[in-house]
Amino acid sequence: MTGAELPLEGGNMSSAVVRVGDTVRRPAGAWTPAVHALLDHLHAVGFHGAPRPLGLDDQGREVLTFIPVRSAPIRPRSGDCSLPVRRTRRSARWPK
């Protein structure tokens, strides 16, 4: 691994997800092969808005390409007492 690990926010396991250069590292699990197959399929059919799987690193974490996105705060609905939620906007186009 080269480069510093920068923690990434959001997602359902954010405390363990880091950016290293142009890649994202996150814990692998039993689901990882199925997720990688889905991401490979999306890319094969022309959808380039999802990360590409690059395998596992020396710590056993899955390695994915980093896709820069813009985040914008979402206003809570009336009566919603939850913490502020962030929405991710990604510009990706499906093949025609």
Image: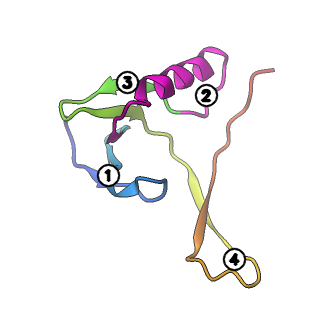
- The verdict on residue 90 being magenta is no
The amino acid sitting under disc 4 is Pro
- Residue denoted by label 4: 76
Q: Position of residue 85 (x, y in %)?
A: 59, 69
In the visual, does 49 lie left or right of 5? right
Marks 3 and 2, Cα distance to the nearest angstrom?
15 Å
Q: For residue 63, what is the image quadrant? A: top left
Q: Residues within 10 Å of mark 1 (few under 14, many from 20)?
A: few
The amino acid sitting under disc 3 is Leu
Counting residues from the start of the chain, the first of labels 1 and 2 encountered is: 1
Q: Give the number of the disc on residue 54.
A: 3
Q: Indicate which label's residue lies in the foreground, 1 or 3.
A: 1
- Residue denoted by label 1: 16
- The verdict on residue 44 being magenta is yes
- Residue 50, compared with residue 88, is above or below; it is above
Counting residues from the start of the chain, the first of labels 1 and 4 encountered is: 1
Which span is picked out in magenta? 25-50
Which residue is outermost to the right? 96
- Residue denoted by label 2: 48
Marks 4 and 3, Cα distance to the nearest angstrom?
37 Å
- Residue 89, compared with residue 48, is above or below; it is below
Counting residues from the start of the chain, the first of labels 2 and 4 encountered is: 2
Q: Position of residue 23 (x, y in %)?
A: 36, 37
Q: In what element is the residue under mark 2? A: loop
